[in-house]
Amino acid sequence: MPDEILQPDDVIRCDACPVLCYIKDGRTGACDRYANRSGKLVRLDAHVILDRALEQGDRVVPFLDAHREWDGQIVAGPEHFVTAIGAGTTYPDYKPAPFIISSEVKGVDMVTVVTEGIFSYCGVKLKIDTDRFLGPEQKMVRVDGEAVGHVTTAEYGSQMLSLGGVHHLTGGSLREGRITCETLLALCNGQAVEMTIDSGATVVVQAGHPPIVNGVKEDRMRVGCGSATIGMFAMQWMGKIDEVVVVDDHITGVLSEHQAGKMLGIPPTGIKMKGRRSTPGRYFRVAEPGTNWGGTNISDPLSILHPFDPQTAKPGTRMLMVSTTGEHAAYYELDKNLSPVEFPMPAALQESVARIAENCEPAMCTVMFMGGAGGSLRAGVTENPVKLTRSVRDTLTRVTCGGAEVYVWPGGGITLMVDVTRLPANAFGYVPTPAIVAPIEFTMTKADYAALGGYMDHVRPLESIVSGGDQRHVAPKPENPWPLSRPAGHEERQ
Amino acid sequence: MREPPIARMLPDGRRVHLHDGPIDAIAEAFGPPEEVRKAYDAAARRFVTILDELCAELDLLRQDAVHTIPLLKGRVAQRMADGVEPFAAASFITPMAAVAGAVAEEILETMTSAATLARVYVNDGGDIAFDLTRGESFRVGLVERPEQPSLLGTAIIPESSPVRGIATSGWRGRSFSLGIADAVTILADRAVVADAAATIVANAVDLPGHPAIARVPAREIVPDSDLGQRLVTRNVGRLTEAEVAEALASGEAVANELIARGVVRAAALNLCGETRVVGRTFAAAIAAAGAKTVLLGGSLPNA
C-alpha cells in the first residue's frame, strides 16, 4: 500500500500538467519548471532565451489544438539568443562565465559569453519630459527620506536626475544603500517609484510612462514655452491673424509685442496682459500653475487679459489664444466696445493649432541603466581581461544587456548605458551587498574569441542550452537589432 | 492551467524536442529526408497522449512493482513493467523507475514502425533508446556527473552489439536515489531495463549508516514521492579512498550479478571521481591504456 500522502499547509498542488505534483514550499515539481514559492505556484525564474520564432508567432506546434496539424518542418529551426537573464554568475571571477555559447550565423561561428554582472558602480540616468520645475540643480533626490541621487543639468524639454552610484549604494548608511538599491532595481525593472526633491517637487517616475509631478500626470511635452511657440510659428500666422497669445505657465508669449512679431512688422493691438513682463512679449506668472490652459489653473483664457488699450485697439481685431500643447485654443474678435467675443475658429487657424499639437511629443520618463563592466567580470570572459576591453572598443565584440543594444562610452573601461525598456521583463536583480545584478552578453566571432584568450574549452553549442533547463523564451523586442547580427561595417569580414 | 504538449525542431534543424510536463525528450532520426520527416511526424502524434496515459495509472505506477505489474494496462506502463520486472522480486522498485526509458522506447518504436531509417535515437533526459540497421553505429559519450557534463570517454555501439538502451542514474539527478553514486550508466538490450537497472545499481553504491551522508525521507521533500518514507540521499560529505572503494565495490557486485543473469550488458559506476567499469567488452576496452573510445561488441563499421 502506498504511504499516506501528507498534505500540510505548505504544500500546494500544481495543475500545469496531469501529474498534479504536490509541491512543498520552496521546492519544484517533477518537471523542475514549476515551484511553490510561499504557497504560490510559480513558473521558475527561468533563463531567458530570445526566440525569433515567437516574434513570428509560431512558437511551437499546438498539439491539443485539433485544428492545426504539425507541419513536420525540419529544415529551418527557430533562431535563439541566450541572454544573461537568469543565467547566474560564477564566483570567484576568474572562473569561466556560466554560459559560453557557440552558434553559427550566416556561416560564421559566433561565440556569446553570457553572465550576470554584479554592479556596485552603477546607477540610472532619468530623463523626465516636463518643463515643470522639479528642483534646483544639485539638490538631493530622496526616496523614503534617503538620498538616492541628485538633480543634474536640465535638457531641452526634460528634467534630468542622476540616481544611484557607488556613493549612495555603499558610501552612506546601510539604509541609504538598501533604499538606493531598491530604487534602482524597481526603476530598471519598469516599476514606478515616487521620489521627492529637496526644495522641489514630488515626482513619480516609471520607464516608458509619463511622469506624475506633484500628483499631476504630464501628457504631452510642450512644443516650447509660450515665447518659443511665438518664435516658431510667427511666420505661419502672418496675414491670418492680428494677435496671438500663447498661454503658458512658464512664459506666456504675445505675438504683437514679441521680437518675432516686431521683426515681421506686426502692429500693436493694444493688448494688456496680466502677470509680470519679462522682456517684450514675454510674461511670467499670468496665472497660477494648474492642469488647465498651458499648465495654468485657468479655464477662461480671457481671465489673463486686462481690457484692451482704447488708444491703440481697433474693433474687429482678430485674436488667437492657444496653449503650448495646442490642447486648448479659442478665436476672438474685438467688438465695438473693444471686448473680445469668441467666434468659430477659421480653418487656417485650426491648421496652425493642429500644427502645434502635432509638434508636441508624448511626455515620457526614460530610465537609462549605466554601469561599468570593465572590472572583474571580464575575467569570466578571458584570462587577459584588457583584451576584452580592446575588443569591445574595436567593435569586434558586441555588448548587449539581455539582448538589448547598449551604448558603450568612449575612453577607458567598458562603461555602458542601456534603455531599460529594451530588456525583457524583470531582467535586473540585486545582491544584498548592496549591488545591482544586470545581465550582460559579449558576442563575437569564434576566431576573435580565441584571439582574446577566451575559454575555448568551455564553449558549448547553442542547442545544448536551448534544449534543456528552466527557460523562458521571449520574443525579441522589434526595436533592438538582433544581437547575433554582425555590427554594421563588419558584414564583409569573415 | 494545463500547458499543451510541445513538439518542435531544435535550432540545428535535425533533432526534434518533445516536451510535456516532466517529460523532455530529444529524438534524432537518420535516413532519407522524407523518411525522417515521416518518423518525426509519427513521433509527435504519438507523444501527444503519452503523459495523459501515464497519469491515468499514476497511482498504480507509484506502488511496489511486485503488486502492480499484472494490473498495468497502458502501452507505456507495460513497458515500465517490463523494465522493472527483473528486479521486482529482490528489491523494492516501482514502475516509475523505468518511466523515462519507457517513454523513449515508445517514441522510438513509433518512429521505426512509421519510417525506414538508417538509425535513430530518443533521449529522454539521459535515458536513451536507439535503433541501428546493418553497418550503422552510435557514438555515445560517458559523463562522470550528469549535472556537470564533461566527457569521461566515448563508447561506440555498432549494429552487431545487442545493446539498444542506455540509462544513467545518480543521487544528484532529477529523481531520488537511495545510494550515493554520482552516476551509474547502464547498457542493456532495452532502454526500460537500462533505466531500472541504473536505479538499482546506483542504490547499491552505498555506505549504509555513514555519518557524512545526509538522508531524508523522500516524502519530506516530495509529498507524493513513490519512495514514500524511504531515506533518499541529499548530500555526500567527505569520504576516504577506502570508503569510496567500498561503496563502489558493493555497486559492482550488484552490476556483475545483473550481467551474469543476462539482464544488462555493461555498467560504468562513478563516485567521487572514481570510476569502475563492469562488463567484459566494455571493461577491456576502457582499460586499454589511454583509450577514450570503447567499442562494445562486434566490429567497427567502415567509417
Image (tube, coloured by chain):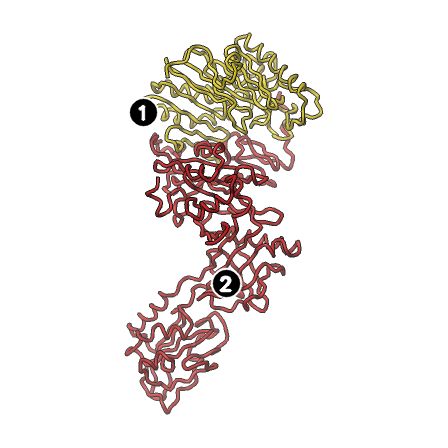
Image coordinates for residue B167, horizontal then vertical, percent? 51, 20
Question: Quick check: B208 left or right of A337?
Answer: right
Residue A196 occupies which quadrant of the picture? bottom right
Instruction: Provide the secondary structure element on which disc 2 rests.
Output: strand
The disc at residue A160 is: 2
**Left or right side of A449 for A9:** right
Residue at mark 1: B33
Quarter of the figure that contains the N terminus of chain A: top right
> The C terminus of chain A is located in which quarter?
top left
Nearer the observer, B234 or A448: A448
Q: Position of residue B21 (x, y in %)?
A: 49, 31
Please rate how many residues cluster around mark 2, counting C-alpha atoms within 10 Å: few if below 14, some from 14 to 19, many from 20. many
Q: Is residue A332 visible?
A: no
**A486 in relation to B197, above or below:** below
Q: How far apart are marks 1 and 2 (CA)?
A: 60 Å
Q: In which quarter of the image is residue B12?
A: top left
Chain painted red: A
Instruction: Name the kind of residue labelled 2 in the image.
Output: Met
Q: How many labels does the image show?
A: 2
Q: Which residue is drawn at 41% across and 77% down?
A: A253
Give amino acid for label 1. Answer: Pro
Image: A344 above or below B51: below
In the image, is residue A387 above or below residue B216? below
Q: Quadrant of residue A352?
A: bottom left
Of badges 1 and 2, nearer the viewer stands 2
Chain B, chosen colour in render: yellow
Answer whether residue B297 is visible to the viewer in this image.
Answer: yes
C-beta proximity under 8 Å, tags 1 and 2: no
Q: Which mark is residue A144?
A: none
| Other-residue count near label 1 (Cα within 10 Å), few / some / many at <14 / 14–19 / ≥20 | few
- Mark 1 element type: helix
